[in-house]
Amino acid sequence: MLKDHADLIASELSEGTGASVALSIVASGVRSGLDIWFQDLEKRHGPIVELRPHGLRAHRVQLRFGNFSKQILKQISEAPTEDIQLARSLVTSIGGEANVEISGQNLECWTIDDGRFTIEATLRHETTAEGGDAIVATCREVIVPIMAAMAELIGYDQIVPEGTPGELEGALSLALVRRRERNPRNRLLCLRLHGYRCNCCGLDPQVKYGSAGKVLEVHHLQPVSQLSDEKRYNPKTDLVPLCPNCHRAVHTRRPTPYSIEELTSMMGANVH
Ligand SMILES: [Zn+2]
Ligand SMILES: [Zn+2]
């Protein structure tokens, strides 16, 4: 039963983290759990997430570092502030039903100091935790954001900025905005916080196109206050999901795109 869901879980994890993951089903007695790690690292060389049944209706998820993670921990300790901020936001996006604990640290401002770092979460289900559906739900709700946070800190798939930074004098550089809009972890956070529909026209592409509808994009809002002060960037409030059409439309004005309100009122004016 769980085997049938393994491919779905792997593809959701890869999409959300922007990295390939390896996954093994671990059977302990009749009950099965999962081990998940980043495919390009040997299991012992990086973060490992274990999912185990906890009682009859709950799952316990634990993230820990393998015994040979020194190199990756060093890489994580050098993560830029913006990546740390996104990683923390991803972990706090885990719903309140999942009880999350981070090495005795504050949920909002944890740091990975050494290989003893752990994140533990318990998620209770309405029905038995044995079924594939419950495991998929735990992966979606808890494991994807945790692994995405680790992927961000490790720096998977950093997009090389295009254009010349600083070409917009006094404004947020176009390259930086593009980098934020294309980061798969930003997309994940944005959709988790703002929902899986276009925040301008309301389109839910997965309703319209079914499984071909994973086309929502991330748009970076640029409040006036931000144009000269990059430090005010907040991934929770400065990113919104837009469908490809609306996203294209807001960017028809350059260098400052139309605001969502402006585009909405332009759309209103064209309704006959
Ligand atoms: Zn739209
Ligand atoms: Zn945009």
Image (cartoon, rainbow, N blue to C red):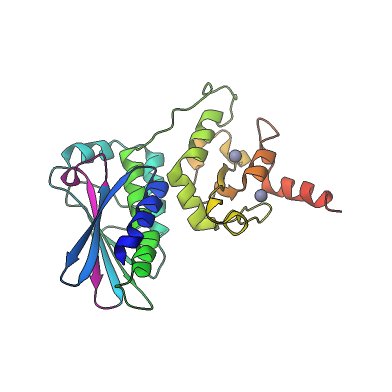
Report whether residue 10 is seen: yes
Residue 185, percent from left and from top:
43, 46
> Would you identify the image quadrant in which residue 50 lies?
bottom left
Q: Residue furthest left?
A: 67
Residue 20, percent from left and from top:
33, 43
Report whether residue 50 is seen: no
**Residue occupying image coordinates x 23% and y 67%:** 32
Location of residue 140 with respect to 134 vertically, above or below: above
Q: Is residue 257 left or right of residue 128?
A: right
> Would you identify the image quadrant in which residue 128 lies?
bottom left
Q: Indicate yes or no whether the magenta region holds residue 43.
A: yes
Q: Which residues are magenta?
A: 38-56
Q: Is residue 39 left or right of residue 114?
A: right
Residue 65, percent from left and from top:
19, 49
Q: Is residue 87 left or right of residue 226?
A: left
Residue 264, percent from left and from top:
73, 50
Location of residue 108 with respect to 220 vertically, above or below: below
**Residue occupying image coordinates x 52% and y 54%:** 211
User: Which quarter of the rendering shows the N terminus?
Assistant: bottom left
Q: Is residue 171 left or right of residue 20?
A: right
**Residue occupying image coordinates x 26% and y 39%:** 40
User: Which quarter of the rendering shows the C terminus?
Assistant: bottom right
